[in-house]
Image: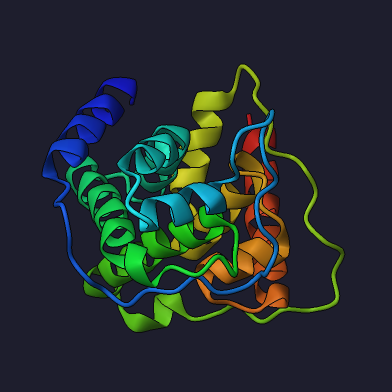
Amino acid sequence: ESGCCQAAHDRTRTAMPEDHALELTATEPDAVSPARDGQASDEALMLAYQAGHAAAFDQLYRGHKDGLFRFVLRSVPEGAQAEEIFQDAWMSVIRARERYKPSARFGTWLYQIAHNRMVDLWRRQRPQTELSDELADDAPGPEQIVTRQDGARRLLALIAALPAEQRVAVLLHEEREMTLDEIAAVTGSGRETVKSRLRYALDKLRRGMADD
């Protein structure tokens, strides 16, 4: 995965154009990322990039490239498709810079862009009914069961076998540590739908890990 990731990064950086315009805006939640160890927040970096400071984009790219590519690759196991979505997400950030407004965490907005590209892919590959929301109920929230253990390879295989939107919810919650509200913003789903997807997915993972 690391070799593929680096190759995707290299191709993405060389493919980035200098200037385009595309109307994309960050939406909900309205919190922003805290500054890290005295460094500028992601939102401040994006605003600096908007003002013409290319080095600010380089910082954003370095900070998010690995996590974003892992998320896309585990959501879209076909390497070429994952690389295309990864590149398209960053190109969209570049084209949207002049219209960017920091009304959401930069990371939430970035993953929302990538998720939208994945949904487009899934709709071309599967019937629309497979992308419909599961019915939410009053069951308790999802438990933290995805852990790094000797069965990590088995766990990743189980995650890859989940329905697309359940897989996305698990990866965002367990690997990216996003809240239910942040996942809802990324996926364009209701909070209760996200909770339901996580519960069903984590139940499947728990059963799969328990099987001999």
Q: Is residue 74 left or right of residue 170?
A: left
- On screen, residue 100 above or below 150: below
Q: Is residue 51 left or right of residue 200?
A: left
Q: Residue at the spot x=42%, y=43% of the render?
A: 68
Instruction: Determine if residue 75 is in view.
Output: yes
Along the line of sight, the residue nearer the viewer: 15 or 127: 15
Return the residue nearer the eye: 60 or 3: 60
> How many numbered circles does the render carry?
0
Q: Position of residue 103 (x, y in %)?
A: 59, 70
Q: Which quarter of the picture shows residue 133?
A: bottom right
Q: Quadrant of the C terminus?
A: top right
Query: Is residue 70 among what the camera can see?
Result: no
Q: Residue at x 18, y 65 (%)?
A: 20
Quadrant placement of the N terminus = top left
Q: Position of residue 136 (x, y in %)?
A: 72, 79
| Residue nearer the viewer, 75 or 176 | 176
Relative to 28, say whether 113 is above or below: above
Q: Position of residue 147 (x, y in %)?
A: 69, 30
On screen, residue 32 above or below 161: below
- Residue at 12% over, 44% down: 15
The percent coordinates of residue 108 (x first, y second) are 55, 58
Which residue lies at the image location 65% right of the left edge and 79% below the top edge? 190
